[in-house]
Amino acid sequence: MPIRIPVVERILQANDDLADQVRARLDSAGLLALNLMASPGAGKTLLIQETVRRLRDRLRIGYVNGDIATSLDAERVAVYDLPVVQVNTGGDCHLDAAMLAPALDQLPLGRLDLLLVENVGNLVCPANFRLGTHLNVLIASVPEGDDKPYKYPGMYRGVDVIVLNKIDLLPYIPFDLDRFLHGVRILNPDLTVFQLSALKGDGLDAWTEWLAQRVAAQRRAA
Ligand code: MG
Ligand code: ZN
């Protein structure tokens, strides 16, 4: 047992070093990069599709899809005619900086304003592996239940933004919004929370306008 802990620390340290290199590349390109995390089925890919559809006339967007296998999600987003890179983790349940770095080689970083990185669907370990992206976004969804901030504190504490998706289902599912938001605030009082339905369109404008403002701020800082 005493051997295992230093090994894990070394792996995470090596990942942190690589994440710093990724961040330096993204900063010098002057773009804003998001690490989008969620459990399977929360609606990550649909939210990304709708985000691209609404912003692609204003922003030059790139997309990296991390999945255990298949390029199904990448194909859904590629219909919007933007640079897309598929990363198959070969069974790993998260992306890490070592997987993202070669994906960046295949993107025209200097000609992008926004990079959307869709992590593998999983609420546990993606939060432990920094990618070097600027913002960690968690997409939660109403069918998952209002107890998730209490059950996955590591994920909820480690993110900058929460998108609560599928709010159109609130009338049909026992989901206590106050309980959910209370759990979020305990862990992460300064968190930005968006409530929306990527399917129906409610709340999407607030999310995309906020994102466009963040991209503009990133560009001014570069
Ligand atoms: Mg997906
Ligand atoms: Zn994992």
Image (cartoon, grey):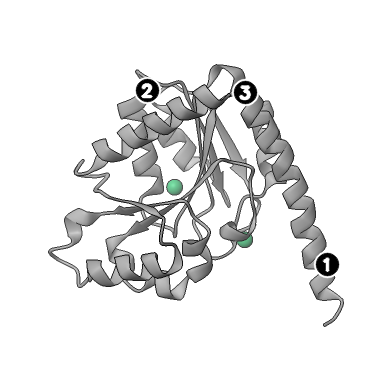
Whether the residue carrying mark 2 lies under 8 Å from ligand 1 is answered with: no
- Ligand 2, by image quadrant, is bottom right
Q: Is 6 placed above or below 134 here?
A: below
Residue 2 versus residue 94: which sits nearer the camera? 2
Point out the tag, 2 or 1, that comes first from the N-terminus: 1
- In this picture, residue 141 sits left or right of residue 40: left
Examine the rendering and report whether any part of residue 220 can be seen.
yes
- In this picture, residue 112 sits left or right of residue 1: left
Residue at 62%, 45% (x, y): give it: 88
Q: Which residue is mark 2?
A: 56
Q: Name the mark on residue 29.
A: 3
Which quadrant holds residue 106?
top right
Q: Is 34 placed above or below 217 here?
A: below
Q: Position of residue 159 (x, y in %)?
A: 49, 55
Q: CA distance from mark 2 to mark 3?
A: 19 Å
* Image quarter hosting the C terminus: top right
Q: Which residue is mark 1?
A: 7
Point out the tag, 2 or 3, that comes first from the N-terminus: 3
Tag 3, which secondary structure? helix
Q: Amino acid at mark 2?
A: Arg
Tag 1, which secondary structure? helix
Q: Position of residue 85 (x, y in %)?
A: 57, 32
Which quadrant holds residue 175?
bottom left
Residue 168 versus residue 184: which sits nearer the camera? 184
* Image quarter hosting the N terminus: bottom right
Q: Nearer the viewer, mark 2 or mark 3?
A: 3
- Whether residues under marks 2 and 1 lie with C-beta atoms below 8 angstroms apart, the answer is no
Q: Amino acid at mark 3?
A: Ala
